[in-house]
Amino acid sequence: MTDEIAETIDWRGEQIDCNSCQHRALLKSGKCELGRACVVDRYARRIDRFFDWNPNLAIAMLAIRISRCGRLRPNMPIFSACPAC
């Protein structure tokens, strides 16, 4: 018996579409799998599994910082000023 949830719904409540995912290239290499390891799934275990399978992407996603003005800035150091402010 498995404790996996059969539905593949994203965090907005919409059906997951691998063809429109920015990580779709990972499907061919077995680094993600619909219903098993997916970063856009609303099921936390699947997100966790995705990052277990792709630790380099976990590090890259953690590198995104929110500036004081609320804009997302990739790779911005935590205590730096926002270049747009």
Image (cartoon, rainbow, N blue to C red):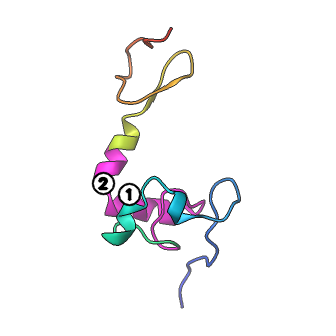
Q: Is residue 80 magenta?
A: no
> Callout 2: 10 Å neighbours few (<14), some, many (20+)?
few
Q: Name the quadrant of the N terminus.
A: bottom right
Q: Amino acid at mark 2?
A: Pro
Give the number of callouts: 2
The image position of residue 42, as x and y in percent, is 60, 59
Determine the residue located farthest toward the top in the rendered image.
85
Q: Is residue 28 left or right of residue 44?
A: left
Q: Residue at x 71, y 59 (%)?
A: 13
Label 1's element?
helix
Label 1: which residue? 51
Snapshot quadrant of residue 43: bottom right
Q: Residue at x 60, y 64 (%)?
A: 16
Determine the residue located farthest toward the front in the rendered image.
19
The image position of residue 32, as x and y in percent, is 40, 67
The circle on residue 34 is none
The image position of residue 41, as x and y in percent, is 56, 61
Disc 1, disc 2: CB below 8 Å? yes
Q: Is residue 32 above or below residue 69?
A: below
- The stretch in magenta equals 35-59
Q: Is residue 14 above or below residue 61?
A: below
Determine the residue located farthest toward the bottom in the rendered image.
1
Q: Amino acid at mark 1?
A: Phe
Label 2: which residue? 55
> Callout 1: 10 Å neighbours few (<14), some, many (20+)?
some
